[in-house]
Every structure is written in C-alpha cells, then in structure tokens.
Image (cartoon, rainbow, N blue to C red):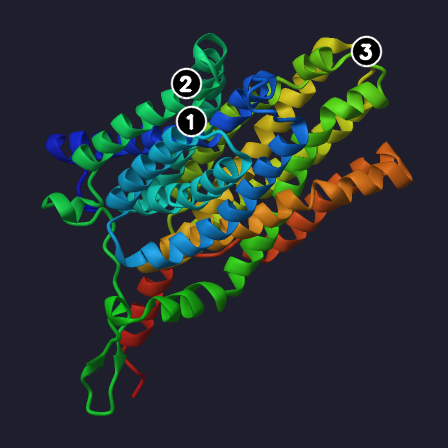
Amino acid sequence: MQDLESYPRAFVLKRLLAFVGIVIGYSCYYLTRNSLTYTAPVMVADAALKMDITQVGVMTSIFPIAYGFSKFASGVLGARSSPSLLLGGGLIATALVNICFGFGASMTWFCVFWAINGILQGFGGPCCARILTSWFATKERGTYWGMWNIAHNLGGFMAPIVCGTAARNLGWRWGMWAPGLIGVVVGLAVLLFVRDSPEAVGYPPVEAIEVAKKKNTDGTDSEVDEDKKSLMTLLVENVLRNPYIWGMALTYFCIYVVRQGVTSWFVFYLMKAKGVTDAGSAAVRVSGMEVGGLFGSLLAGRLSDGLIKKYPQHGAVGKRVQVVIGYTVGVAAMLLAFKLTPATAVWAQWASVFMIGFFLYGPQMLIGLCGAELVGPESVGASEGFLGWVAYLGAANAGVPLSIIVKQYGWNYYFVTLWAACAIAILLLLPMVNLKNYVQREAAKKAALNKPKAA
C-alpha cells in the first residue's frame, strides 16, 4: 500500500471507521474510569452509605495500583489476541463493572469492583496502539496518533457532564449506571465496526516489513517466525532487551513526574505561595492545561510527520525524538514563566498553564508512539504496556515525594525538581535523535545481508 499515490476510497472509509471507533471507544474507557470521581461527592452526602472522604481515598488508591500493572500485563498477554475484540470486550466489561458498582452498599463491594475496573481499564491503550499502527503508515502516523490522543480530553470532558449530572439529579447510583450503559453500547459498536488491520478486510498492509533473513550454512534462508515465538520471548527480546525502550520508559517516567506534579500541586502552589484566596479561583487559573494539551499533541504529531516526510532517509523515531526534546525545553521555560508571573496577572497565569499543557502533552503522546515504532507488530502491545507501567510509577512519585520536598524545602525546590526531571528527560533522549524505526532497521539489515561480498 505504501507504493500507491493515494489509498482506494473503500479502504479510506474502513480505516476512518476503525479510527473513529478507537477514539470514541477509548474516550468511553475514560468515562467509565472517571465515573467515581464525579459520583463520590454525592455518595458521601448520602447518609445511608455512612461514607467519608477517607473511604473514597481508599477506593481511589486501589484503582491506579490495579491499572498500572494491568496495562503492562494486558499489553503482553494480548499480543496474540484480536485488539478490536479486546478493546470492545474490555469496554463492555468495565461498563458492566460500573453498573454492578451502582448496586452496592458496602465498602467491600465498592473496593472489589473498583479494583476490577482498574484491571479492565488496562486493555484500552495497548489495543488502540496496535490498531492504529496497523492502519497508518509511519509518514502519517504521528498526525493520527495525536488526533487519537484527544480521546483523553474527550473522555475527561464527558465524565463530569454525564456522571456528575446523573448523580446530582437522579442519585449516586445513576452516576455509575449512566456511563456503564453508554460503555456497553459503544463497546458493542466497536466489536461490530472496528477491524484489527487492513489485512483483516482483504487489503495488503499499509507498510510492508522486509524482515532480514540470515543465511544457513547450506546457503538457504533462515528466519524465525515472530508468530512462533512465545509471548515471554517477544517481551524479553523485543522490549526488555531493547536499550532504547528503556530510554523511552525512563523519559516517560520523568515526563509523568512533571505532568502529575503540575496537575496535583499547582492549585496548592497558587494558594500557599501566590496568595490566591480559594481553591475555586486557583482552579480557574490552571484550567487551561487540558486545552493547551489538546492543541500541543495535535501539532506535535503533525510536526514529527512533517520532518519524516522531509527527511525520509533519516531515522523516523529520531525525528519524533527531536520534537519531544524541543517540547520538553518548552515545558521548562513555561514552568519558569508560571513561577515568575505575579498573582495579580490572572490571565498571564492561565496562559502560562495553557502553554505548559501545550508542551507537556506533546512528549506524552510522542513517546508512546516512539515506543510502538521501535518494535515489530507482535510487540507493540507489550511495548505500550511496559511504557505505561513505568509512566504510572513516575506519576506515583509526584505524590508523596513532592509533598515531602515542598514541606521540608519549600516551593522553590518543587520547581527545581520539575526542571531536573525535564533535564534528565532531555539527556536520556539525546542519544536517540537519529534512531530508526523497526521497519527502517529491518530494511537496512536486509540490504546489508543481500549486499554482494567483494571478490
């Protein structure tokens, strides 16, 4: 398909259907993931439940632990399963868990089902990555990966409207039932309309992979079929033994330290250090982050695709890495701007947070894409799961450790920590600015093996 000047109309329509399906499907994963956030206040207000904020904290602490490990495990174990089946089936399952949660009345019930929800949520991201990399070639993948990334924003936007409104007007149980019912319907639609790859509907792959074949002693080709390797072998050989995957993972760790550090602590910083009088006013000043992130991720994908098209012989992953480095420098600069902006300049603070989100969401999106492009099709899910797990560890380290730094050393060292995370991320990325993707590396290996030896 990569040799065609344009794709056939029927192919474009099927691909569009798959793309819309993973965007809406993953946004509904976010809807069923965030349902408790906007239902919990109504649950606490319900005298019959006898629930307080501490019990809500227990439930919300259980979820990320289950989710972090599930994302890694599902990426590995799902490598041989249909990604569209796992995506749609997982969404239906997490939707049913939300519905079951709404029938409960005890903490044990709530904790068990919320932990199950965390486990099921891990199916979403790796499956979407596998579908997207199958339908879109390297030259256009960054653009569509960035567009798919808006599912995070779309789901986050829908959650307070659907869950919060239902809980407030119909009771807390409907705050869980409403997203659950929506998830069941969308999950069924994903199963019906989304296909795993072009090959599943009779088209050739969008990007042919020329696997290098070594020569046996008798002169015949020797090739180990990736499909015949065990899941553990694929994980170890293609992911855990790949130093660049580890570099991407550690970079992801640093980026998530900054992301979670911003989202968790900026409101407190404005109130404690800048003198903003209440949490509502502070929240308004930091509300631009998600909006900025939406535009930043879209532009990052376009920029990296543009560089790849302009320099087709250069490393495709390296071009995306160059964009990530530029964006990370932007994050550090905007953190400084936010710190120096006086409390009286409300719109300047909002603008600086908008730009932090703009620069922060670009690396968040592109690092995941780089991880997918560094490995073969069989290992995309495992790579995404591993990166997501390490990113979760980074987010976890932005909680208690940053609170200790703020308490013992003050807000200046809080910003120093975020700048240090940016600097470490850039240092980790510098050796990868010329890195080729899996397709390019395999093509280069094949060319080297087929090159005639000098007499």
In this rendering, is residue 208 above or below 237?
A: above
Earlier residue among tags 2 and 1: 1
Look at 53% across and 21% down and name the residue there.
Answer: 38
In this rendering, is residue 114 above or below 159?
A: below
Earlier residue among tags 3 and 1: 1
Q: Are marks 2 and 1 in contact (CB under 8 Å)?
A: yes
Look at 48% across and 56% down and name the residue there.
Answer: 435
In this rendering, is residue 414 above or below 370?
A: above
Q: What residue does disc 2 label?
A: 174
Residue 124 seen by the camera: yes
| Mark number displayed over residue 153 | none
Q: What residue does disc 3 label?
A: 277
Give the quarter of the image for residue 151.
Answer: top left
Q: Which amino acid does label 1 sit on?
A: Gly
Earlier residue among tags 3 and 2: 2
Disc 3/disc 1 C-alpha distance (Å): 37 Å
